[in-house]
Image (cartoon, rainbow, N blue to C red):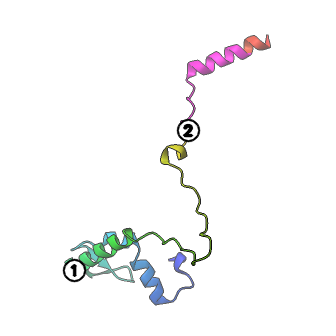
Amino acid sequence: MARYEGMCASNKFRAYTSNARYLRALTAGAPRIGLDGKPAGTVTPEEEAVAKKRLSESVNETPPQVKVAPAGQAAPELPAVRPAAETEKPPAPKRLSLADLREAGRRRREAAA
């Protein structure tokens, strides 16, 4: 839990139990592990349902809202969004085969001679 250093205990537990990995692991009948690392009961179907609800809520969070300028002021310019076709990476160059490398070596030797 090194990434939780400097947080009070309640905030550490909140951050840990809000983690998507933790929520996905809560399945009914699975062993619940205590802070000492030993089994401490089993996960109930109700706890699984709550975990699934919290997980879906965290995935479906709304994106940040765009701030609107007050009346009489110019709205801030937003960066232009490019269509996906323009932002795709170019195709990788063709990988050379052994025959290609041999041919390149032959040409170098001929040019040097």
| Residue drawn at the location 62% of the way across and 18% of the way down | 102
Question: Observer-nearest residue: 95 or 58?
Answer: 58
> What residue range appears in magenta?
91-108
**Residue 90 versus residue 12 in the image, above or below:** above
Which residue is tagged 2?
A: 90
Q: Residue at x 25, y 79 (%)?
A: 47
Report the disc number at residue 46: 1
In magenta stretch: residue 94:
yes
* Position in image of residue 10 (x %, y %): 45, 89
Q: Which of 40 and 97 lies nearest the eye of the viewer? A: 97
Indicate the quadrant containing the C terminus: top left, top right, bottom left or bottom right.
Answer: top right
Q: Is residue 65 left or right of residue 76?
A: left
In the figure, residue 93 lies in which quadrant? Answer: top right
User: Residue at left 39%, top 83%?
Assistant: 36
Query: Can the viewer see residue 23 in this picture?
Result: no
> Which quadrant would residue 20 be assigned to in this image?
bottom left
